[in-house]
Image (cartoon, rainbow, N blue to C red):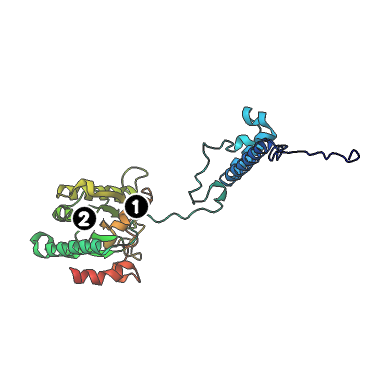
Amino acid sequence: MADQKTPIIVRRRKGDHEHGHHGGAWKIAYADFVTAMMAFFLLMWLLGSTSKFDKQGIEDYFNAPLSSLMGGPEGTSVSRPNVINGGGRDISDTRPGEGKRTQAQPTPPRADVVTTPVPADLSRLQQLKDKLNALIQTSAILRDFKDQIRISITNEGLRIEIVDSQNRPMFASGSSKMEGYATTILSQIGSTLNDVDNRISIAGHTDSVPYQQGPAGYSNWELSSERANAARRALVAGGMHEDKLLQVRGLADVQPLDRNVADEPTNRRISILVLNKAAEQAFFQDGGRAEVGDAKGAAPASEVVPTVAQKLLPAVHKAS
């Protein structure tokens, strides 16, 4: 019995050393990893929402920070926007950014600009024409001069022309003093023009006989301008509202009705154009540089092929 060895029994309690070597270091490592990933995705978001000019500015700043802050030569970040606005571009905005504007975006047409005559406008001008024709027929004063009054609808509106006749000129030769009958004609129709709110252009025309009288430098240009102004005064005296006037000009002999006869009486005329809305807006849209009316009488709408005005006229006649 003395030779038998006593067994050694080691008792271990469960959980004494299990996972003891790990500690809490893994939590710190995991927090660092999450922070790095968040920073990475934030960087990706910033790069995606920044234009190429901002990126170039940032690159220039880190390449030469002092020149970016103090100012540098042309081509550095000083010539570009190098500061990102707070928060960057709104990523919910799907419009192209600065760096994507490689082509000019088309500008939609303005809805308030009329480019062609509209039926209502043509109808008003047609009614005004009919009223003037009726006035000429019923007025004992105007009926005697009906051969010298020409009324037509053109691409630009309603044209009223008072022309000379061989035996009855509107003005004395070489003068801007209006004869009594011409003053009467313009005074009679002046108030009628107030029936529409359309603006008016007045032009004076002479024949092609050179002006021989008056001071040096005075020509058919001055004469036609003064005659147009005399017509304006007669219309206003007849009751036309002066604020309806848009243009008063002299055209000398550049737009004759008959080019073959230098002293053709009908070339000496006063042209009154009641502008349609399309011609009026075109005048203002061009800053007043556009010349309105009087392109060789601007052929009546019935002779213009094919225009929108011509297509609309039959419907306007039916409506009126």
Asked where in the image residue 188 lies, by quadrant, the reply is bottom left
Q: Secondary structure at mark 2?
A: loop
How packed mark 1 is, by other alpha carbons closer than 10 Å (few <14, some 14-19, many 20 or more), is some
Q: Is residue 1 above or below residue 238?
A: above
- What label does residue 170 carry, if any? 2
255 on left or right of 143: right
According to the image, label 1 marks what residue? 283
Question: Of the residues under marks 2 and 1, which one precedes in the sequence?
Answer: 2
Looking at the figure, which quarter contains the C terminus? Answer: bottom left
Q: Is residue 229 above or below residue 81?
A: below
Q: Is residue 63 above or below residue 103?
A: above
Q: Nearer the viewer, residue 186 or 103?
A: 103
Q: Looking at the image, which residue is at 51% across and 43% down?
A: 89
Looking at the rendered structure, the kind of residue marked 1 is Phe
Q: How many marks?
A: 2
Looking at the rendered structure, the kind of residue marked 2 is Met
How packed mark 2 is, by other alpha carbons closer than 10 Å (few <14, some 14-19, many 20 or more), is many
Asked where in the image residue 103 lies, by quadrant, the reply is bottom right
Where's residue 101, x and y in %? 54, 50
Q: Looking at the image, which residue is at 15% across and 56% down?
A: 192
Asked where in the image residue 295 lies, by quadrant, the reply is bottom left
Looking at the figure, which quarter contains the N terminus? Answer: top right
